[in-house]
Image (cartoon, grey):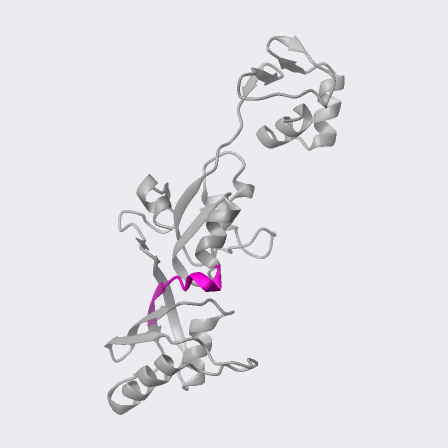
Amino acid sequence: MRLDKFLSNTTDLTRSLAKKAMHREEVMVDGVVVKNPATQVGSHNRVSWLGQSLALVGTRYLMLHKPAGVECSARRGLYPLAHELIELPKTERLNPVGRLDVDTTGLVLMTDDGQWSHRITSPKRRCEKVYDVKLAEPLEGEEARRAIEAFREGVLLDGEEHPTKPAELEMIDAQRARLVLIEGKYHQVKRMFAAIGNHVTDLHRSSIGPIALDAALAPGEWRHLSEDEVAAF
């Protein structure tokens, strides 16, 4: 790897600023000042900037218990960003594996491994996501039965040309439901219930595929995935 790229990957320096740091003789490789940004370095080299040893950040796989009021986005908006809750270097490189709305809570997987992320989000994988839903209006009896059947057959959402893929709806009580989806359209859960004349007041994602949200994680907390959890996809 080029030295300037190595510096940009391990510090807050851009490649342009890394070149300037080298020109100021702030960068050393194996104890020797290096000014050439094209110098090739690898894991066998000892690289330092202003006396601080640097090391590449490896590939990371995390689960986050996303609280309400946090955005799953790379761009600064009105709310804090999900990666800002993670106390690791270079968290801006961590991307959510499927987003949640700002007011939706629950499981968010985060990684800087794009191929792993694609294996989960690709429509061909039909990865199940489970949501706990609270409704504004009671849904019971014959009305609930019709909703379950409609979701199983697919619902045509406002503005869409094709109905949703089959989804499994289970009513826990008159105003609480469990919904299993295999796709992720924009605001899909809320739009599905709106299509049958109801309104979602609270939404929480409890699992993605075989990975369930760790019950030990409070809102805003995170942990690394285990090797088995990573391999599950």
Q: Residue at x 48, y 60 (%)?
A: 122
Closer-to-camera residue (218/15): 15
Q: x, y (%) of residue 172? A: 23, 74
Q: Is residue 89 left or right of residue 229?
A: right
Closer-to-camera residue (45/199): 45
Q: Which residues are magenta?
A: 122-133
- Residue 18 is one of the magenta-drawn residues: no
Q: Residue at x 72, y 23 (%)?
A: 38
Q: Residue at x 72, y 14 (%)?
A: 25
Q: Is residue 56 left or right of residue 50?
A: left
Q: Find the residue positioned furthest to the top.
A: 31
**Count of picture labels:** 0
Q: Quadrant of the N terminus?
A: top right
**Residue 79 vertical position relative to residue 89 in the rendered view, above or below:** below
**Residue 51 vertical position relative to residue 126 in the rendered view, above or below:** above
Q: x, y (%) of residue 76? A: 60, 52
Closer-to-camera residue (152/23): 152
The answer to whether residue 226 is seen in the rendering is no
Q: Find the residue positioned furthest to the bottom.
A: 142
The quadrant holding residue 209 is bottom left
The answer to whether residue 177 is seen in the rendering is yes
Q: x, y (%) of residue 197? A: 41, 86
Q: x, y (%) of residue 33? A: 68, 11
- Residue 128 is one of the magenta-drawn residues: yes
Q: Is residue 43 left or right of residue 198?
A: right
Q: Residue at x 52, y 50 (%)?
A: 81
The quadrant holding residue 37 is top right
Closer-to-camera residue (196/5): 5
